[in-house]
Image: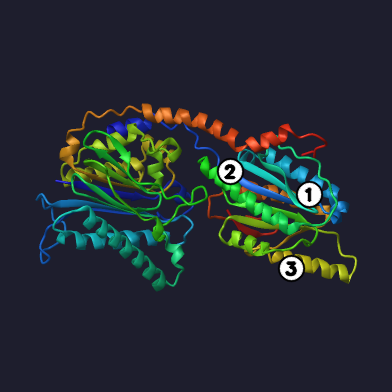
Amino acid sequence: MLTAFNISQQGESHRQRSIPCQDASFTRRIPYGCIPETDSSSDGNTDDKAVVIGVTADGIGQCAFSDRGAQTAVGAAADYLICRIPSVRTLTDDSVYGILRAAMEKAQEAVRLQAEKEQNPYISYFSTLTLGIFDGKSFWFGHAGDDGIVVLYTDGTYEMITSRHKGEYAGSVIPFEEESVWEFGKARGEVAAAAMMTDGILDYCVGSEAMHNVIRAGFVVPMLTNIMDTDEAAEESRKEWEELLGELPEESRETRVFRMDVTDDITLALMQNPEAVGKLQDLSCEEGAWRNECARGILRRVKTNKKLFAAYRKFKSHLTGPREEI
Amino acid sequence: MKNIRDYIASKHRGIENPGEVHCLNILLIDVSESMVPLQEDVRAGISRFFKMLREDPAASGCTEVCVIVYADEARVLVPFGPVYGFEMPRLEFGGMTAGYEAKRLALEVNKERKEELKANHTAYRRTNIFDITDGRPNDPENGVISLLRQSQTEKHCNYIPIYIREEPANDMEREEIDRTEEQLRSMVVGDHPVLKSGRDNFEGIMNFLHVSISDMAQSSPGTKVTLNPQNFQLEV
């Protein structure tokens, strides 16, 4: 039986500035192949044909109502998926991409209507949006923004399967309301588990593009291989993550350390095929690749700075005559 | 979950410093004939500007400056360089005021620099173009005002004119000052006014520029930074 949970929490930086949590998320297991008249809600159906869906959104920091925009986008996309998926007979790439695109369009429309109703500029509701559909083997996604999805394959390898849609300036992001960046895709192999994350926690455990998106194995492998074989186990996992990431009043030492590193809002949506994950319990958490990329990063910076200021150094070396006293 | 708790508790952190976010600044300096009486004030102000930037820990590590001078023609005097160890040739004053050519050159230089930074995976903030002048350009405009406004509207740069002039001695001079200010204002997108300075407070204006850059260097993209004492806001 596929399992999933999701959490979204206000980050330290938002707490200190009294900004509400601008993240939103949703997960649910949904049967498909149902006839249209039957109840399409998730009811603990353990038959073969079911998927788990995940939806995450991160409101753009400077947009006044982006917390509401993110919630609306997630709610509208989730509602559409819940209604639409049960009547799908077979999950093909084309059918799933069509469903994901329609879900994003519904989300876009819902946010626009909300802005009109509340008589505020549409731009003030902007957010990212990422959708995932997992049938226990294949993982399809629709995505816009700097959220991301990391998957664990049944062969024990793992990678981030989305790209970060960053804006031109440092820290800026392209929102999902900009349709030209919408990305649809599918993980390249058979998936055992997937983690959907907003940028706060994503950037903690996945290196930058310059670091070839290297995965921080010590954090990601345990996250993806912790078995949740029942809904109760998934709920237990959710509570543990909530506590670890700092939602509850009792703050452990690990929470304090984590919150020093990740000050942004935090969203984590985990989706799993427990049977497949069960075969991967001996995966190594060794971080050689991460450490190598970090070390290379230092050298890369030195090299980059030399390159960026080559023209200036050449100018300086040829500078003759009087100079300004600065 | 125990593994993750142990991992976090052991303070495993990435060794890589992702690097500073580069703050790009272009100084356009009018070195035409009319600026000759003001040259020592300009020199003192620029000297103060760089000194304060170098001594500012928030700004010094990430600020790049390019200097463009304009008189009969506009040219890049110093290509983008870091403020620490910044050197520039002694300014030479005299000639006409190719102000429009200088603005066009600034826009080109800005675009090229950003492409270079992007190609090298280096993050940057919106460029500030500071234009230190005592009067209106007298070279052909050729659509530069429109380009400059478009660049600001599309958030490629902030354009901040700094109008340095003597106190008007008569109504005619006062009218000329007003016309110049209006013309400079027409090139600005946004609510911020043209910064005005007399000879005696030009150093103060340059000090204010340094503080502005320092504040911007520490701000998040998209935020509006209030620049005192003129009390206007620029978007980072």
Q: Earlier in the sequence, mark 1 or mark 3?
A: 3
Foreground label between 1 and 2: 2
Kindly state the secondary structure of the residue where label 1 is placed: helix
Question: In the depicted view, which residue is nearer to us: B64 or B54?
Answer: B64
Foreground label between 1 and 3: 3
Q: What type is the residue that disc 3 sits on?
A: Glu
- Measured as percent of width and height from the top left, residue A183 is found at 35, 53
Give the quarter of the figure containing the C terminus of chain A.
Answer: top right
**What's the coloring here?**
rainbow
Residue A115 lies in what quarter of the image?
bottom left
Q: State yes or no: discs 2 and 3 in contact (Cβ < 8 Å).
A: no
- Discs 1 and 2 share one subunit: yes
**Disc number placed over residue B22 in the picture, else none:** 2
- Measured as percent of width and height from the top left, residue A263 is found at 44, 44
- Residue at 21% x, 32% y is A280
- Discs 2 and 3 share one subunit: yes
Question: In the depicted view, which residue is nearer to us: A188 or A277?
Answer: A188
Q: What type is the residue that disc 2 sits on?
A: His
How crowded pointer 1 is (Cα within 10 Å; few <14, some 14-19, many 20+) is rated as many
Q: CA distance from mark 1 to mark 3?
A: 23 Å
Check the image and report above or below for B18 versus A135: above
**Disc number placed over residue B182 in the picture, else none:** 3
How crowded pointer 3 is (Cα within 10 Å; few <14, some 14-19, many 20+) is rated as few
Q: Earlier in the sequence, mark 1 or mark 2?
A: 2
Q: Earlier in the sequence, mark 2 or mark 3?
A: 2
Q: Circle 1 is placed at which residue position? A: B203
- In the drawing, does residue B147 fall left or right of residue A247? right
